[in-house]
Image (spheres, grey):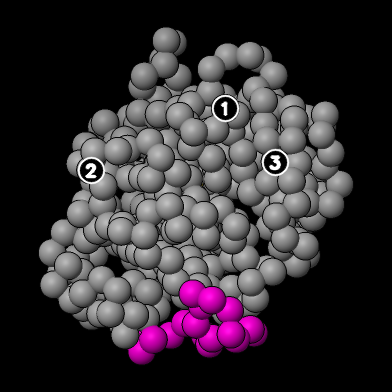
């Protein structure tokens, strides 16, 4: 079951004109741990009820004493505007997690490629701290392609430059600025398939991409698609490409709810067994929330994977925008787009 915790904002640092890093201290005083690349789901109230926004850690356990998240203001984003412009040291925020699968594997691969833009650097910063300052044995070769408009709008530019200068043998840092030319270590232009392919061949090499390298993509959806497509064309297996997407998928069509037909969902892994009913055509998550059962979620549209649960018994349709996957025992299901197929379904929710 989900556990929403309270945090005091104990630090606020302006990174660029529209992004800040917030340092958080858990109010309950209990230990708080997370993996590089994970995020917190901030919970807040709006006129339409409970809302969630995911913000990645830019810090790393073992390097930073307290967790920090970096928030970029989104145009028309009321909550990100509030965090960037109004939230002050001493304020309280509520968040669930940590969550997320944008994490590093064990053992580490020999080469790790990052492609990010704007605030997409946030979870990557957490990775870099781990790879360059905590994990001292594996020493993978790291190549970061980081796209922004200008140097001044580049989050963590100073820290990245410092890390690159300290590890020239294993950390290659390439900036791509669309509205500025002449900056050291930076290319001028827009990242596209041809440029990415050329940079990958030059800084990584086709054989390393084919064998053993992993790629992490954290950027607007179009850039993630372009990056993945280029890597696939260079024969990187899809399972070696990790994508972090926080923009809800608004192409989903919800099914029609039929209240005359119900399914029983049993949650295992709780001290007391919990069961609840879903209507035909109602997602497992919506049915749980309707009945006051706090299952974890953030995007409610199948992109963030906060809501993942393991199917123990029965069958569930997981309905993405472009495909429906029927999952059974042992498979993971997104409860936010998961519809019970069998009369009885048992799932185990972590967190
Ligand atoms: S809540 Fe994001 S995938 Fe389900």
Q: Name the residue under label 2.
A: 138
Q: Can residue 263 be seen in this view?
A: no
In the image, 293: left or right of 225?
right
Residue 16, quarter of the rendered image: bottom right
Looking at the rendered image, the disc whose residue lies closer to the viewer, 3 or 2, is 2
**Circle 1 — which element?**
loop
Q: Earlier in the sequence, mark 3 or mark 2?
A: 3
Residue 280 point in image, percent of width and height:
45, 46
Q: Does the magenta-highlighted stretch encompass residue 332?
A: no
Q: Mark 3 points at which residue?
A: 22
**Circle 2 — which element?**
loop
Q: Give the range drawn in magenta.
A: 179-195
Q: Nearer the viewer, residue 40 or 9?
A: 9
Q: Which of marks 1 and 2 is nearer the N terminus?
A: 1
**At x 17% / y 67%, what residue is drawn?**
208
In the image, 69: left or right of 99?
right
Q: Is residue 182 visible?
A: yes
Q: Does the magenta-highlighted stretch encompass residue 192?
A: yes
In the image, 65: left or right of 231?
right
């Amino acid at each position: 079951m989900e556990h929403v915790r309270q945090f005091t904002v104990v630090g606020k640092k302006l990174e660029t004109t529209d992004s800040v890093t917030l340092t958080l201290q858990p109010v309950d005083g209990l230990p708080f741990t997370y993996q590089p690349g994970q995020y917190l789901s901030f919970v807040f109230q709006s006129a339409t009820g409970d809302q969630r926004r995911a913000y990645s850690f830019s810090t790393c356990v073992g390097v930073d004493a307290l967790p920090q998240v970096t928030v970029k203001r989104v145009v028309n984003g009321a909550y990100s505007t509030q965090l960037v412009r109004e939230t002050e040291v001493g304020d309280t925020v509520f968040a669930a997690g940590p969550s997320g699968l944008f994490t590093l594997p064990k053992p580490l691969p020999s080469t790790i490629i990052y492609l990010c833009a704007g605030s997409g650097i946030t979870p990557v910063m957490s990775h870099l701290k781990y790879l360059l300052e905590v994990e001292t044995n594996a020493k993978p070769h790291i190549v970061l392609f980081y796209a922004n408009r200008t140097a001044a709008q580049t989050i963590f530019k100073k820290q990245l430059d410092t890390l690159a200068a300290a590890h020239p043998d294993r950390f290659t840092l390439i900036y791509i600025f669309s509205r500025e030319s002449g900056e050291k270590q930076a290319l001028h232009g827009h990242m596209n398939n041809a440029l990415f392919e050329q940079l990958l061949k030059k800084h990584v090499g086709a054989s390393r991409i084919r064998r053993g390298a992993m790629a992490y993509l954290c950027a607007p959806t179009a850039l993630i698609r372009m990056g993945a497509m280029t890597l696939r064309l260079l024969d990187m297996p899809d399972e070696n490409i990790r994508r972090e997407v926080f923009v809800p998928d608004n192409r989903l069509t919800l099914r029609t709810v039929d209240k005359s037909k119900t399914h029983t969902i049993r949650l295992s892994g709780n001290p007391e067994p919990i069961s609840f009913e879903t209507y035909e055509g109602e997602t497992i998550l919506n049915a749980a929330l309707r009945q006051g059962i706090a299952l974890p979620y953030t995007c409610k549209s199948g992109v963030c994977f906060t809501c993942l649960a393991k199917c123990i018994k029965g069958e569930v349709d997981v309905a993405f925008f472009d495909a429906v996957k029927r999952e059974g025992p042992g498979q993971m299901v997104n409860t936010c787009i998961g519809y019970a197929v069998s009369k009885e379904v048992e799932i185990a929710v972590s967190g």
